[in-house]
Amino acid sequence: MKALVISDSHGAQEDLRALMILSEKQIKPDALIFCGDGINDVIPYRQAVLQFWPVRGNCDLSYPPGIPLERTERMETLWVYIAHGHTHRVKHSLLSLYYRAQEVGARVACFGHTHSAMARWEGGILLLNPGSLRDGRYAVLEIGEQGEVKAELACLN
């Protein structure tokens, strides 16, 4: 299963449109994971994938009903924890995010808020921040049928 992971679009409609065209032609994801801050930017694209897993961020002051602050979703045999990261203070430390992912049994924790792309394994959990879509950054997360995890950080520019 493959997911397109984006965060922090902050109104970057042109980059979002370009990424969705690229996604449809080349990436072909099964899911779209949105890690907050720009939820209203991505809502129009929810039908472009089989699964749409958004969370709201600290800048998502108006948002459609039912968009949570965090969620845990199943990809193949693994659980993926999704949050914006502001409630975990990820600009200061990733420890709270790591512990929450561990608590919910996730093998991957997707987050945003810092605008800095990273993919790092900590204690058996992949901490994945796609960076800010406003800067053209995104990630592709793949989970194989046997639980293999692959993450690729990428940039539109």
Image (cartoon, helix red, strand yellow):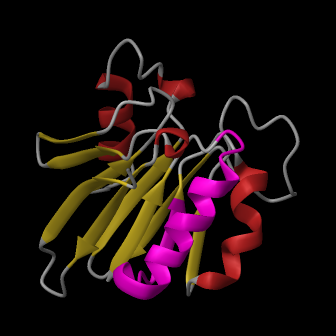
Q: Relative to 78, is 155 above or below? A: above
Res 117 seen here: yes
Residue sitting at x 36%, y 30%: 116
User: Which of 72/16 is in front?
Assistant: 16
Q: Is residue 110 magenta?
A: no
User: Which of 44/112 is in front?
Assistant: 44
Q: Position of residue 48 (x, y in %)?
A: 62, 83
Res 54 seen here: no
Residue sitting at x 41%, y 81%: 29
Q: Relative to 13, is 29 above or below? A: below
> In this rendering, would 156 be left or right of 18?
left
Q: Position of residue 83 (x, y in %)?
A: 52, 44
Q: Position of residue 28 (x, y in %)?
A: 40, 85
Majority secondary structure in the magenta region: helix
Which quadrant of the rendered structure holds the N terminus?
A: bottom left
- Most extreme residue toward the front is 157
Q: Is residue 18 magenta?
A: yes
Q: Position of residue 53 (x, y in %)?
A: 58, 66
Residue sitting at x 32%, y 34%: 99
The quadrant holding residue 10 is: top right
> In this rendering, would 7 be left or right of 119?
right
Residue sitting at x 30%, y 24%: 95
> In this rendering, would 134 be left or right of 107?
right
- What's the magenta region? 10-33
User: Which of 11/125 is in front?
Assistant: 11
Q: Relative to 121, is 92 above or below? A: above
